[in-house]
Image: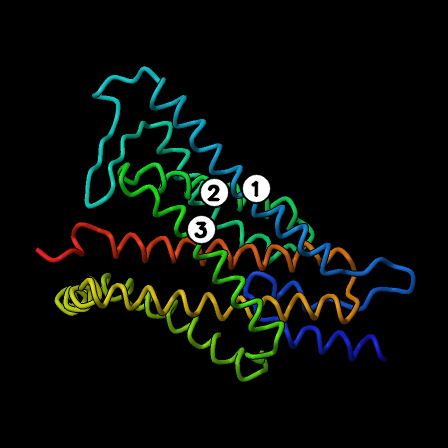
Amino acid sequence: MEAAVSEKKSVSRMVNPVIKKMAKRADAAAEGERTASYGGIGFKTVFFLLTTVAGIVLYFMLHQMWVVNGGFSPEETWTFTENIFNVTTTPYEMIALIVAAVCTLGLPLLAWAIRPIIPVVGILYTVSQGYLIGFLTGALEQDYKWLAVLAMVLTVALVSVMLFLYAKRIVKVNKRFKQIITTLFLTAIFGGVIMFVLQMIPGMKNIVQGIQGVTQNPIVSVGISIVFIVIAALFLLADFDTIESCVEERMPKKYEWMAAWGLAYTIIYLYFKILNLLIQIFSKDSSPT
């Protein structure tokens, strides 16, 4: 009975969409079974982040092989220059980028449906995300490549601040808090879906173009990016609450992978949003003419 109550409490505290469904069948560890620990979750989170770095390294290795030393003729390469981006790529690299993008979209859904494969899916996901980060970094003009490093520093700083706020209970993660951030997240998602649907409806083109004209305004665009960063930062607090739930309620050690990937997922998402914000701020099109 006690375990059942603990299970219900654990499930109610889960909020990260990556791990919420998988937590529904979570239960307290049997007597003598190894339980989740902060050290175990921390180690696995760092492991996922290191595989992201491995993905970055993989991109530059393949880029060197396919683009720099690939021997492609100018007709077989694609060059794209806009704002602070200067990209030269080949068909092989484009295929790899498409595969990485599909993985980052599909793998979380697969892990959401099949919990035991999280260690494998998590590695594939983080490597794919690292590959995309490597591409974005390589695509930046030489004078702006430092933006990728600055985004990393800001991400680490923001994660540290949110961890401090949670550890000191300066911000309390309760049911209302989770409802608010979930509402914000779903509103952003549904907003994007509605815009996509409107584009498919005849006669709505002018309305869509009007909305896009507003959102593409540099000031509005930066404001929207900041909102997404705030939402991601708030989700970090929910992830910390999930980790505390796993440990304090003595869930089986296998759930360390679940909690670690949930946190790594949010951190990587936060990094992309911060990098996107920096690119908008330093973009040539954003500067006054």
* Residue highlighted by disc 3: 152
> Disc 1 versus disc 3: distance between alpha carbons?
15 Å
Q: Residue at x 19, y 43 (%)?
A: 82
Q: Secondary structure at mark 1?
A: helix
Q: Tell me the amino acid under the disc marked 3.
A: Met
Nearer to us: label 1 or label 3: 3
Callout 1 environment at 10 Å: few (<14), some (14 to 19), or many (20+)? many
Q: Secondary structure at mark 2?
A: helix
Label ID, residue 264: none
* Residue highlighted by disc 2: 130
Q: Tell me the amino acid under the disc marked 2.
A: Gly
**Label 3 vs 2, first from the N-terminus:** 2
Of the 4 image quadrants, the one containing the N terminus is bottom right
Numbered disc total: 3
Q: Tell me the amino acid under the disc marked 1.
A: Thr
- How far across and how far down the image is residue 146, in percent? 35, 44
| CB contact under 8 Å: marks 1 and 3 | no
- How far across and how far down the image is residue 27, in percent? 78, 68
Quarter of the rendering containing residue 251: bottom right
Callout 3 environment at 10 Å: few (<14), some (14 to 19), or many (20+)? some
Q: Secondary structure at mark 3?
A: helix
* Residue highlighted by disc 1: 51
| CB contact under 8 Å: marks 2 and 1 | yes
Q: Residue at x 87, y 64 (%)?
A: 30
> Disc 2 versus disc 1: distance between alpha carbons?
8 Å
Nearer to us: label 3 or label 2: 3
Q: Is residue 13 left or right of residue 64?
A: right
